[in-house]
């Protein structure tokens, strides 16, 4: 069997932790699928613009190997891991993914979509229309998903955090709030979040997103997390250095100048 990419997805999610778990749950993750030219894909796209949603079949191009079990973002009560075939884990024997995205428009061989949970430069293997009559089974049993922990934490923000977040949204491609929600919805004590530091005495924490840091406080009785502030992860000395490994120091310099 020969399988080859028919195109490439382009979006703002560069690292694995940038992509939301199930794009529909976190709207505002747009991107575009650019099909390969010279294959008569213009004709293949005919009549697709009348569909609101698409099934996108893609390759998990950043993964190597597979695992027989996986730890879901929100596991079932009393269990830490589930079987890979009972999950949407990207670590599969064949690294093939399936995502239901919302179609915004088609221009030539470019499809503009939203609610995407794909990484930038993901190879696209196929596109199919989502047909509610055939694809939706709202009453179907969902196995262990029905036993997921429901007592999740509430995430709130402060004006100081909102001001910085809005500036970043207008001046960078980073989507920090969705990342924070995904990372902290199970609470600040999830030991799978390796970019998380907790001060249990002060009831505060710091979550790293790329080279930015989110400061928050938490209250266990109310199961509430408040995002207090957003700051650069670079020191003043690092910002003065011409070395720019991640290509984002200009954003940080402008951010620091704005909010000092």
Image (cartoon, rainbow, N blue to C red):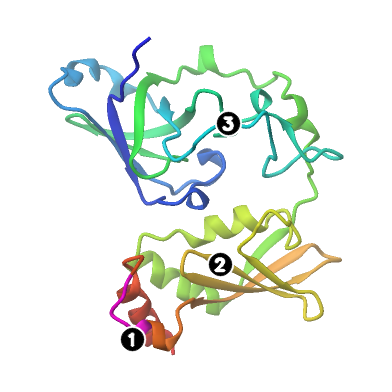
Q: Residue at x 35, y 17 (%)?
A: 3
Q: Marks 3 and 1, how far apart in space?
A: 42 Å
The region drawn magenta spans 239-244
Picture quarter containing residue 196? bottom right
Picture quarter containing residue 79? top right
Is 108 above or below relative to 176?
A: above
Query: Quick one: label 2, few (<14), some, or many (20+) residues within 10 Å?
Result: many
Quadrant of the drawing holding the C terminus: bottom left
The furthest residue to the left: 38
Q: Position of residue 155 (x, y in %)?
A: 66, 62
Q: Residue at x 44, y 20 (%)?
A: 130
Residue 54 in view of the camera: no
Residue wearing tag 3: 66
Quadrant of the drawing holding the N terminus: top left
Mark earlier in primary sequence (3, 2): 3
Q: Which mark is residue 118?
A: none
Picture quarter containing residue 118? top left
Q: Which mark is residue 240?
A: 1
Q: Is residue 168 left or right of residue 111?
A: right
Residue wearing tag 2: 208
Q: Nearer the viewer, residue 9 or 156?
A: 9
The furthest residue to the front: 65
Q: Is residue 229 left or right of residue 51?
A: right
Q: Position of residue 242 (x, y in %)?
A: 28, 80
Residue 86 in view of the camera: yes
Q: Residue at x 80, y 74 (%)?
A: 200
Query: Quick one: label 3, few (<14), some, or many (20+) residues within 10 Å?
Result: some
């Amino acid at each position: 069997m020969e399988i080859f990419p028919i195109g490439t997805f382009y979006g703002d999610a560069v690292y694995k932790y940038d992509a939301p778990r199930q794009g529909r749950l976190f709207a505002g993750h747009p991107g575009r699928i650019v099909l390969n030219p010279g294959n008569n894909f213009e004709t293949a796209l005919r009549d697709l613009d009348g569909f609101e949603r698409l099934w996108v079949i893609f390759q998990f191009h950043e993964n190597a190997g597979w695992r027989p079990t996986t730890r879901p973002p929100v596991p079932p009560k009393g269990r830490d891991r589930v079987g890979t075939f009972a999950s949407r884990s990207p670590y599969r024997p064949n690294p093939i993914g399936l995502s239901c995205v919302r179609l915004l428009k088609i221009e030539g061989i470019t499809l503009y979509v939203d609610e995407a949970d794909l990484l930038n430069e993901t190879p696209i293997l196929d596109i199919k229309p989502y047909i509610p009559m055939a694809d939706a089974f709202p009453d179907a049993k969902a196995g262990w998903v029905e036993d997921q922990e429901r007592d999740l934490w509430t995430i709130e923000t402060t004006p100081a955090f909102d001001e910085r977040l809005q500036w970043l949204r207008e001046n960078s491609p980073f989507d920090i709030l969705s990342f924070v929600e995904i990372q902290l919805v199970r609470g600040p004590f999830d030991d799978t979040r390796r970019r998380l530091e907790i001060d249990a005495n002060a009831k505060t924490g710091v979550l790293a997103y790329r080279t930015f840091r989110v400061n928050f406080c938490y209250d266990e009785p109310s199961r509430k997390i408040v995002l207090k502030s957003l700051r650069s992860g670079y020191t003043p000395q690092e910002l003065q250095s011409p070395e720019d490994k991640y290509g984002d120091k200009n954003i940080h310099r402008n951010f620091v100048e704005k909010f000092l």
